[in-house]
Image: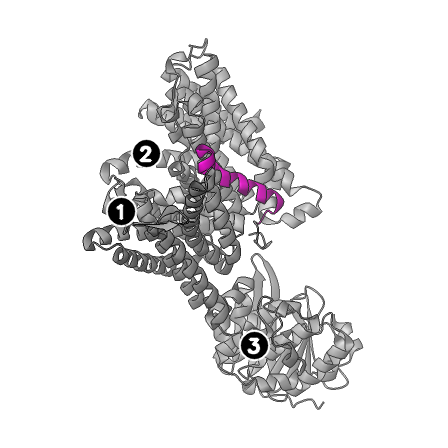
Amino acid sequence: MARALHWWWGILLAFTLVALSRLVLPLPFITEVLIFSIYTIGCSFLLGRVGFISFGQPAYLAAGAYGTAFYLFYFGSNPYIGVLMGVLSGLAVSGLVGPLFVRLRSDYFALVNLALAVIIFYLMQKVLAGITKGDNGLWFLTNIASTPVLDIASPNGFFVFALIAAVAVWALYKYLDDTLFGACCLATKTNEDKLEFLGYSNYAIRLAAFIIANTTTALAGALYAVYLGFVSPEITSPARAADPVVVTILGGTGTLYGPLVGAVVYTGMKDVISKLIGNWELFIGFLLVFIMLAGEKGIWGTLQPRLARLLFRHRGSAGTTRDERPTR
Amino acid sequence: MPASAAPAPDSALVSVRGLNTAYGESKVLFDVALRVSDAQIVACVGRNGAGKTTLLKSIAGFLKPQSGSIVFNGASLVGRKPYDVARMGLKYVPQDKRVFSDLTVRENLELGSYATRDYDWGRVIDYFPKLKQLMDRKAGYLSGGERQMLMIGRALLGRPKVLLIDEPTEGLAPSIVSHLKSVFGEIGKSSALIIVEQNLPLVCAIADKIYALKEGRIVAELAGREAMRPDVCEGFL
Amino acid sequence: MDAQLLLSGVIFGLSVGSIYFLMAIGLSLCFGLMRVISLDQLLYYSFGAYVTYSLSLASGSLWLGLLGGVIVAGLISFAVERFVFRRIYERELTFSMITSFGILIGGIGVIKAVWGVVPRPVPVPTLAQVDVLGTGVPVYRLAIVAIAILVYAGIWLFLNRTITGKAIRAGIEDVEHVEGLGINVSRLFTLTFIIAGTLSGLAGALHAPLIMVDPHMGLEVLAFAFMVVIIGGLGSIKGTLVSALIVGQVVSLGSLIYAPLAQMAPFAIMMLILLVKPTGLYGSPLLKK
């Protein structure tokens, strides 16, 4: 029991804080943060653990969003199934392109993902406009039926659902980190050859990581769809490719809570900065450069080791938690 | 070849002291010291992974040492960029016989001349007559021996005071090795050479001094006919 | 499809391909020599376009505007090299990708601040058409192709007949080795970066009259520019030329056949080529970093 608590305490603490913030922060803000952090954790995982950056995360976001949208617009009204459809779509897309993408070198990988996002944008906007209604988007808010026990058609109910989903996702990634798979991912980043010599396949590990990460991203897309009740191609436009990258770096690449911290800061800043200077890109672009040149640790990446030392100092142990970014 | 007299400490051309170098987290060189005088041929021998290349690269500026001093002609080399070091007259000839394959032999030499402003290729041809016929051939099509000749010939431009040569005879036919042996002897009359090699008979024949490097540490410094024999060297590795 | 339509399609494709070519050389060179992914090249493209817009509006001459656009792009790229890239050459590829992406995004912000968000049209210098084999072909598009050919010739001469160019080619193979010869590679890097920035600026300047300038134009072209580079193989000038030609023709002729798919065709081609050669047509199987 104690061991289970020890494993879970970080996640429970983090999301209890999020839940409590409901008392002071507006609901739309926290819901957005939750979904956004789920969106980002896939990207962060890929970059921090496997060493690949993708500039095309909107592609998988869209896969999830449109998967859910198609179901809720054309077929049914159960939002849970809608979300499931979104996740399955993400699984399908990443399973389809994964085998090719993960063979590529890191720079090609980043850019083919971007190309994929552009293609999907174009597909949704023009080519399949018949079923996607192009730029007008698919509206299905009214289609969503109320669900028993937890009515995710309502804002509060949805918030609880998103919270549970986030906890589940975090548990998944923490679990992965702790397993052999997690160690292998790290190994593919730092020393491929040794891993092959040990008998593991870099390719298989990368592919698995890719699919997991992007299915998570698709889940975020599905959640967005149900939350907004509306999906349009804008969700996958190239201009949005920056979001998950920035949040990943801002929060702290490869750390478990980085995406959450990053999402909070990013979404918060966006509101504030937009009101103050109005030129969001200027700010975020140079912030990104600044963070990279200043050590690329990000907010949580810098705070976390210090917190760990503070918290664990009295225990006398070195206090390196699983979340510390591996040395390059 | 007569061994040169032991140099007084301050007349050393290149003086390395307390050199510690690491690749990221793993330390490769531990407190290495060596001394080379004008027109002296010094060899550094050791097994694979002993740190020989790391040593040469540290001296030439390609690797930043964690600590220690490297003094060349009175000036400190630590922290200088490799092209700076090369311009000062200390040139590094890497292993693996890498030349610029897409460029012709002539163009390879042109690059060597460009930085040093030494266009006296006659000297280079004197040492390596074969290069004259190969001038317009793309360096990628040269044989191993020809590449080595090109690399050394190119490094000679600018009349460097010191040449650091990394495993020159590896994989070469005996006839070429013996050609190189006489070339080194000739070069060694006017420039200092630090040669890293695994070919013990070669270095024992031409070196004035041999350092044995084992697991990143200098374990022996041999001079004199008696000490510089392959079996003696072997014993230290 | 009749011959006239085909011919204008080919010319159109050549002009589009020329723009991609100019963009792609910069990206390829930066990677080949310095091993960085310079996404900020798309920013110099944008600045080239915008300065051309402003100057040509102010002076009434597109060619003057073009000159200004190219110069400004070159200057900005010099500044970025000096203050940012010089610190990051040693780092792994993802580092330069993310950092240059930040510069691109930040630069878009600057453009928004200076010129506003509304797309602006740029006047074409000449609407004249020339009769080629019975079809009216816009002179401007031919001019673009001519300029691209000149640039290719210039680059070829530079890389093959000048000592600095040879040093760059040698550096693409083995930078450490070039350094060991006593050649100042810092200056070589700076020069190459400025060349790349200037060419990207030229691409933007030339492209401006054909499209409207808008702050996000860099992002819109980003995917295509990189598809060209990836198909050709990062680091190869010849590959870039071939690839740009192919992509230009595919986009142009493809849109004559079936418009919606034309934009997606380069992507499909890229996937196919990567399946067979993961480093592109002429890309070298470089060390993974």
- Label 2: which secondary element: helix
- Seen from the viewer's position, the closer of residues A160 and A57 is A57
Dominant SS type (magenta)? helix
Residue type at mark 2: give it: Gly
- Seen from the viewer's position, the closer of residues A152 and B155 is B155
Q: Residues within 10 Å of mark 1 (few under 14, many from 20)?
A: many
Residue type at mark 3: give it: Leu
Q: Are marks 2 and 3 on the same chain?
A: no
Q: Residues within 10 Å of mark 2 (few under 14, many from 20)?
A: some
Write the residue at 53% across / 51% down.
C232
Q: CA distance from mark 2 to mark 3?
A: 60 Å
Residue bearing mark 2 = A268
- Seen from the viewer's position, the closer of residues A98 and A166 is A98
- Seen from the viewer's position, the closer of residues B131 and B14 is B131
C260 part of magenta stretch: yes
Spot the residue most to the front: C134
